[in-house]
Image: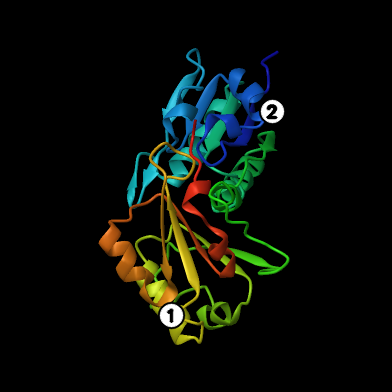
Amino acid sequence: MKRKGKVYLVGAGPGSPDLLTVKARRILGKAEVVLYDQLAGGVRDLLPAGAELIDCGKSGSKHTLEQDEIERTMVEKALEGKRVVRLKGGDPFLFGRGGEELEALRAAGVPVELVPGVPSAIAVPGCVGIPVTHRSYASEVVILTGHEDPAKEESTLDWRLLARFRGTIVILMGVKNLPSIASCLVAGGKDPDTPVAIIERGLDPGQRVTTGPLGRIGEIGREAGVRPPAVIVIGDVVGLYREEDLCGAK
């Protein structure tokens, strides 16, 4: 009787191979097929040599495989009886399209299991000494995608509400739209002196932190040549950052 395949949606964490969970490394080591996104070099080195490796990396509008192709490939490989790992940066269910892939696999009758990953939205700020919550500064945090331009009328995010948010705002995939995001928040009433940190290539040897006030962060980021991938933190907790606390992948 043919063995029934299974798909594991696995979080690779924020980039450092040391931050893969024990379960993630165990499942990855047994994989027969791995569909992987853009990963830091140290994590790529852990891909099993004996498995079929399928690059699904995405960079901006450039996609190695489109999302429907990724989902179709996972289903096909699992129906062949293979043990399939879908490896994603951070956590699959935090802006990783893991929810869509879960639905596609369920619809095809393919067994699926989530293996959570360390989310970059929390780990990357934390590793440069910025806690996203702090009893004296922020009792709440919101994590959002900066992929869509807030100046567009069809934006799904309520930027006026976010401008009044008193906690920490963490933005992923927001480098391109940061000037527009900052302008919308200030226009909505957020203090232009609110501190902001842009953490590029978090937990990678090339990690860099750029800080500045919300009202000028777009200009500062442009002058510094900030590039994705980066985690952007807006809020009073950024005031806890000290350059000497900087840590990267070691």
Which residue appears at 73% of the width and 66% of the height? 135
Q: Residue 113: percent from the left, percent from the top? A: 69, 36
Q: Is 18 in front, or is 146?
A: 18
Which class describes the residues within 10 Å of circle 1: few (<14), some (14-19), or many (20+)? some
Number of numbered tags placed on the structure image: 2
As displayed, is residue 21 above or below residue 171? above
Determine whether, in the image, residue 66 is placed left or right of residue 137. Answer: left
Q: Compare residues 141 and 146 and report the one nearer the observer.
A: 141
Q: In the picture, which quadrant includes the N terminus?
A: top right
Q: CA distance from mark 2 to mark 1?
A: 41 Å
Amino acid at dot 2: Lys
- SS label for mark 1: helix
Residue at image position (51%, 27%) is 34
Secondary structure under the numbered disc 2 in the rendered image: helix
Left/right of residue 122 with respect to residue 208 in the rendered view:
right
Is residue 236 visible in the rendered image? The answer is yes
In-front residue for pair 170/8: 170
Which sits earlier in the primary sequence, circle 2 or circle 1? 2
Q: Is residue 27 above or below residue 73?
A: above
Residues under numbered marks 2 and 1 in contact, where contact means CB atoms less than 8 Å apart = no
Q: How is the image coloured?
A: rainbow
Q: Which residue is pictured at 50% across the width and 12% down the height?
A: 50
Residue of label 2: 23
From the top left corner, tell me how far across and down residue 133 is, in percent: 67, 62
